[in-house]
Image (cartoon, rainbow, N blue to C red):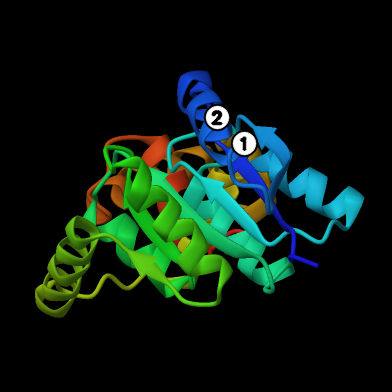
Amino acid sequence: MEKMYTVIIADDHAMFTDGLKSILANEADIQIKLTASDGQQVINFLRSHNSDIDLVITDINMPDMNGVALNGLIKDEFPHIKTLVVSMLEDAQKIKTLTDSKVNGYISKNSEKHELLTAIRTILKGSNYFSERIKEAMMKAMFEAKNAPEIILTEREKEVIKLIAKEYTTQEIADTLFLSKHTIESYRKSLISKLQVRNLAGLTRYALENGLVD
């Protein structure tokens, strides 16, 4: 009897999700268990159903929980599940973060149908798959990491950014760490400058991508 593979799709663009469902509908041995619009829905499903899922196909930019955070949680809680990122983004640093977190594959949304199926089949059979464009971006990330100065956060800075990522207000962070509101505001401005991000969303993304949030 032919083995059946179970798949989850996570993407907040209905057009892409519908297209991928249409492609996989022609694959007799692949069953879609869930389509979700963000990573949190996927994690909730996995935790509540304890499903025997083989592969999660995910975008990067999604509300509530992005694909980078989703991949990290899957690899921590469900290490047997394979992950494939299909995204328009080809950001070298995000790719490095994903590969460091053991993502099994990454291709562009611009990929042809045959490459998408090749990636899925390759991963389901136990190997990893990265498109040529993504491999080039990975090499770029390795080069940048080798030449970039190391950013070291103090323990206090880690505490502050962790609470920012958990959506604490400035006053709540000050109360939790027994510091003044002015001190927390200074930490926030310093972290934005130090990490070269633009706003609190950038700090939150950094915390998630670097494992600073439980």
Classify residue 87 by image quadrant.
Answer: top left
Residue 22, percent from left and from top: 55, 29
Residue 103, percent from left and from top: 47, 66
Classify residue 157 by image quadrant.
Answer: bottom left
The residue lying at 33 percent from left, 39 percent from top is 109
The residue lying at 66 percent from left, 70 percent from top is 76
- The label on residue 44 is none
52 lies left or right of 15 = right
Quadrant (top left/top right/bottom left/bottom right) for the N terminus: bottom right
The residue lying at 36 percent from left, 41 percent from top is 113
1 lies left or right of 165 = right
Q: Confirm whether residue 61 shows in the render.
A: yes
- Looking at the rendered structure, the kind of residue marked 2 is Ser
Residue assigned mark 2: 22
Residue assigned mark 1: 25
- Looking at the rendered structure, the kind of residue marked 1 is Ala
Secondary structure at numbered mark 1: loop
* Mark 2 neighbour class, 10 Å CA radius: few under 14, some 14 to 19, many 20 or more: few
Quadrant (top left/top right/bottom left/bottom right) for the C terminus: bottom right
Residue 187, percent from left and from top: 39, 50
The residue lying at 45 percent from left, 39 percent from top is 182
151 in relation to 5, above or below: below
Depth order, front residue of 33/209: 33
